Amino acid sequence: MQPIKNVATLGADGKLGPAVLEALVSASFTVTVLKRESSKSSDEHYPPSVKVARVPDDLNVESLATTLQGHDALVITIKGSQTEVQKKLADAAVRAGVRRMIPADFGSCDSSTTEAQELVPLFKHKADLRQYLQTLAAQHKGFTWTSLVTGHFFDWSLPFIHIHLADRRADVLDAGEHRCSTSTLARIGEATVQVLRKPEVTENQMLYVQSFCVSQNAIVKAFEKATANDKWTVEKYDADDFREREKARASKGDAEAVEELVYYLGVVDGDWTKKKGFAMELLDLKDEDVEAVAKDVVARFS
């Protein structure tokens, strides 16, 4: 298989997109940022080597296919809920001869499990998208895909992972000893690069990556050390009670409760080291040090 050189990406201005774009550029890929015609976001902050291509707001497949001509890979970092948009992108990628697509599946949770799909409807859509990509790959020999499952984004929103930095307070489920895999945004960028560098061994599968897999208690201790050894207040919640409470709220349309169920799943069923597709060695990635990462996060978020 020829090396992947030319990469198109959609979602470069989102929460994950900038880190992935930086990693692609640093790895010397030739990168084209796809932007909808109505997008008001500036192009000036992109590195000089990055090209920008405007695409129709409705993401017409024919127009997209024309834009994607000559690209080896397509990396999508829009909201994972936009599965119908991603199906259009996949159809366009097939028409354009794109060889690898990485969908917006950078999940906090393993969306393939029955419990995840029952608690969070979004994960059914993610599973449906993967099935769609599998079908396309079976029908078109030159097209392949890779999904990356990353655990919670460690340095995106601290309140989402129940770390309240200003208050020196954290929440844990049960005794705080559930081990779960989490990833920094930079690590997700690294993993994306490694998938594209190793196309033969990463094609048509879900791969699990992490910055580290530690208990919630270990994360709290790392933040205590990073805040001049301040003693943090820790609130403990019974995991089953937490799930049932948030499930009831979510059934009434509470969007915040859905986020809490994602948090719950990423803690109680988030140990990627036990997964068949655990890919740290495959991708030549090493675990990061949780204390060093916490120190960096405190410096940036304070």
Image (cartoon, rainbow, N blue to C red):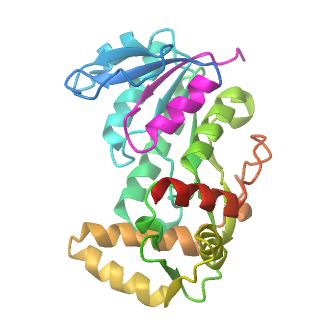
Name the residue at 22% across, 27% down.
40
Q: Is residue 144 visible?
A: no
Residue at far front of view: 228
Quarter residue 268 falls in: bottom right
- Residue 21 percent across, percent down from the top left: 51, 30
Against 157, residue 240 (above or below) is: below
Name the residue at 70% across, 52% down.
277
Asked if the magenta segment contains residue 242, the reply would be no
Residue 45 falls left or right of residue 73: left
Residue 156 falls left or right of residue 179: left
- Residue 254 percent across, percent down from the top left: 23, 71
For the magenta stretch, what is the residue range?
1-26
Quick one: quadrant of the N terminus? top right
Against 269, residue 80 (above or below) is: above
Q: Is residue 13 visible?
A: yes
- Residue 25 percent across, percent down from the top left: 57, 23
Against 167, residue 36 (above or below) is: above
Q: Nearer the viewer, residue 19 or 263?
A: 19
- Residue 220 percent across, percent down from the top left: 60, 75
Q: Nearer the viewer, residue 44 or 145?
A: 44
Q: Nearer the viewer, residue 38 or 302?
A: 302
Asked if the magenta segment contains residue 9, the reply would be yes
Name the residue at 48% across, 14% down.
48
